[in-house]
Image (spheres, helix red, strand yellow):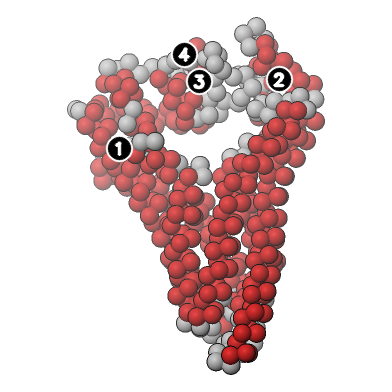
Amino acid sequence: MSLVSIISAIGNNSSIYPLLVRDCGIEIPAKVGMTYEQNLKDSKLMAKNAVRERLIDEYGTSAIWLGGIPAIDYLCNKGIKRLGYNPKINPDLFKETSAQGLKFNIEKFKNISPKEVEELKKVLANKNTYEKLLAGKFVLSTAIPVILMGFCLPKMNFALTAKLREKQNQKLKESETKQIPKGGENISFKGAASVFANMSTVNKMALTDGGLTVGRVATARNKYEKLEMAFKMAGMMFLNFVAPWWIASAFDKLSNVLFKTNVNLDPKILNDKEFITAIKNNSLKLPKEDIIEFLERNPDEKFSKLAEKFCGVKYLDNRIRDPRQFVNEKKIQAFQNEIEKFSKQAKESGDIEKFAKKALKVKSGNIIANVALSSFLLAVVLPKITFILRKKVTGSDAEPGLVQ
């Protein structure tokens, strides 16, 4: 994978890659280190227990969070196929329009994509069953990770701590050289089927994060741990799923003002020599009226290939548009608008290739800065605020659930 592809991946806030980088690569190691330092103020034993719990909690949650939804989706899709349905069929096609829909696509593609049309016919004849299968898939792919992350993992983690503390307490009593610190009191700080089926993995992760918050608060060991967990999880949800979009938008708008450069396109597009050459030669063909008609008549045009890569347009192996998939015309129109803005600025610059290279550097810098800033907020600022509030409310530096 090239450097541009890596930057593109971590800059795509609709994918799991920015979450993977922030969560496993930056946030968890930083938070574990800060947890140790904070609890060390209480005692070495407290720091040891806190770090062990944090490592199990963070990496265990990340493994379920990042891998659970795709794994369950995969298994559910296999089950749906065994029942004779193709899970690729987009339920948005249930809504018939003048350009697409189940009935519309069956009629339009009956002579050119007979296999796919037969799959559409089966779904059309068993719409309720297909909707229930998709709803079941959604429930399983979100509920199972929530149960595992929010209830099972913390319960097992707490049980392990309780078991180890029994041994630690026994050793302390035997040696009579150390005493586990006490905090006085036990305190410290604290169409539905269509919507479900078309939720991206990241959107499902955001939803499971909400369920995770409920689970973590419910399984917390005392009221102050519940309060701290609620604050921390709410902050994490905001910084993972909302803030990166705001930061990216702010950086891109600032770049347009400071550098007179539209950087709303993906770095891979800005680095695409064929795309830049097409702008230079005025050969980039764009839709003028009917987007779907353009995509079907010009499957090998550069714009169609870009829409396939960045806007979810699907083609069969013979380059016939996949009739089972819904075309998001609004998204493609917005994408086209950004291409037109970029093309206009590039031509006005006098040197299209130089302008594209500049845009690529600016966009890459914005993405790296976004990841760095959002990671800093997650890994440093949020824990620091949590520790300050914990100390202010409880007078203790120790993890809420570990104070005896």
In the shown orientation, is residue 3 left or right of residue 355?
right
How crowded is the residue under tag 2: few (<14 C-alpha within 10 Å), some, or many (20+)? many
Q: Residue at x 24, y 28 (%)?
A: 353
The answer to which of 44 and 368 lies nearer the viewer is: 44
Distance of label 4 from label 2 (alpha carbons): 24 Å
Q: State which quarter of the image contains the C terminus.
A: bottom right
- How packed mark 1 is, by other alpha carbons closer than 10 Å (few <14, some 14-19, many 20 or more), is many
Residue position for label 4: 298
Q: Is residue 238 left or right of residue 230?
A: left
Picture quadrant of residue 375: bottom left
Which three-letter amino acid code belongs to the residue tagged 4? Asn
Amino acid under label 3? Ile
Q: Tag 1 or tag 4, which sits nearer the N-term?
A: 4
160 over 151 or under it: above or below: below
From the image, tell me which residue sits under label 1. 360
N-terminal-most mark, 3 or 2: 2
Three-letter code for the amino acid on which mark 2 is drawn:
Leu
What distance separates the C-alpha of mark 4 from that of mark 3?
A: 10 Å
Q: Position of residue 11 (x, y in %)?
A: 42, 43
Label 4 or label 3, whichever lies nearer to me, is 4
Q: Which of disc 1 and disc 2 is earlier in sequence?
A: 2
Real-space CA distance between mark 4 and mark 1, rounded to the nearest whole angstrom: 28 Å
In this view, which residue lies farthest toward the top? Answer: 111
Disc 3 designates what residue?
291
